[in-house]
Image (cartoon, helix red, strand yellow):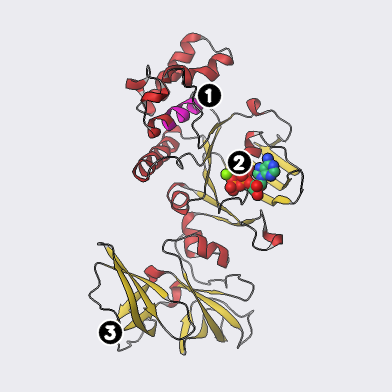
Amino acid sequence: MSRIEFKNINKRYAPDLSLTINNANLQIDTGEFCVFVGPSGCGKSTLLRMVAGLEDITSGDLLMEGVRVNDVPPAKRGVAMVFQSYALYPHMTVRDNMAFGLKVLGSNKAEVERKVKAAADILQLTPMLDRLPKALSGGQRQRVAIGRAIVKEPRVFLFDEPLSNLDAALRVQTRLEIAKLHHDLGSASMIYVTHDQVEAMTLADKIVLLHTGALIEEKGSVAQVGSPMALYHRPASLFVAEFIGSPKMNLLPAKLVRAEATYAVVELAGQQVTAAVDARHVSAGAEVRVGIRPEHITIAGSVKREGQGCTLPATLLHMERLGDSSLLYVNVGAGIPTLNVKVEGSASTSIGERLTLRLIPEQLHLFDAAGQACERPIVLPS
Ligand code: ADP
Ligand code: MG
């Protein structure tokens, strides 16, 4: 049975009362790691705080294990929350910080000790139990905050940007620890808020991507829900396509030439390019956008061979060598945005060189005038 369900949930904050959350319908299953992601201000924290019971729900129903909890107080929901700011008590030791919540609830001493010890073991904090927070690094402080959540033995862990205050190396390390924690705790569900698509991709079973609201009717609405690979391989709209993936997907203006059930031909920079999508709802001659991820373009010899996709002539404008890979910035025609190409190794090309790009139909995306992705009839990894 599903653990948490959002049914037609709306949120309006006073005083302006515009929709901050617009008709959220979601399901988070037991034991699932669900990440709410999106640009700053899109409503991620609001959505999370509604689960915690820290924010009123304007309309709609929030269910936990089938029971409506809109009016259930936070302490009775079986949730524990970890914030970006660790919010530890500075005058208390690590041990007391972790034990405090349980003591307030009146748990007996032996039980408190057992739970704190178990959490400290999981988080490798045992040698630090008698230290004050000021004697800990940022990563260790965040682990104490996570420990404080673990001892409550919640059914659902709620994380609000827990890694944002850590430096890059520590973020990666703590990210792995959170993934391991989820694995070790088995049946506990996790809802994790971040603006960072890499955190979302690496941690999530399920990603919920929220709109920022360039269009008023989209503000605070869910742009797409799915596995990381589903959002990467099958973004439902331009917004999702641009948000997921680094470097960003290239989006190029094109015209539809012909649409069949399993493929469409477009004119892109004077070339005919085939994409394995169903664009039959778009009229011939209409403007579309072709989406190509930098890592899905290869540099080819200039002779086209059968069955290897389409080719596009290009000129190298600039190159960045990263060691394991190189980013090429290429021009494919006047008035067309510079294309970003990611190739393995250190490319042995020079500025101004003419290149032939090879595009694979199964890796091309097509977006209609409304910014919606054309369906992909073939099966891709999910
Ligand atoms: P995110 O966590 O995605 O950055 P939030 O959920 O914090 O976004 O905020 C979503 C929107 O709601 C923002 O425009 C923000 O200014 C507004 N907002 C958040 N909290 C309040 C509040 N207590 N009162 C009024 N507006 C708020
Ligand atoms: Mg937030």
Mark 1 vs ligand 2: CB below 8 Å: no
Q: Is residue 364 above or below residue 136?
A: below
Q: Amino acid at mark 1?
A: Lys
Q: Residue furthest top?
A: 109
Q: Is residue 250 above or below residue 38?
A: below
**Magenta residue span:** 142-150
Task: Give the x, y percent position of residue 21.
Answer: 69, 49
- The mark found on residue 152 in the picture is 1
**Label 3, on which residue?**
301
Left or right of 288 in this view: 295: left
**Label 2, on which residue?**
48
Task: Give the x, y percent position of residue 334.
Answer: 46, 86
* Mark closer to the chain start, 2 or 1: 2
Quadrant (top left, top right, bottom left, bottom right) of the N terminus = top right
Q: Amino acid at mark 3?
A: Gly
* Mark closer to the chain start, 3 or 2: 2
Is 106 in front, or is 167? 167
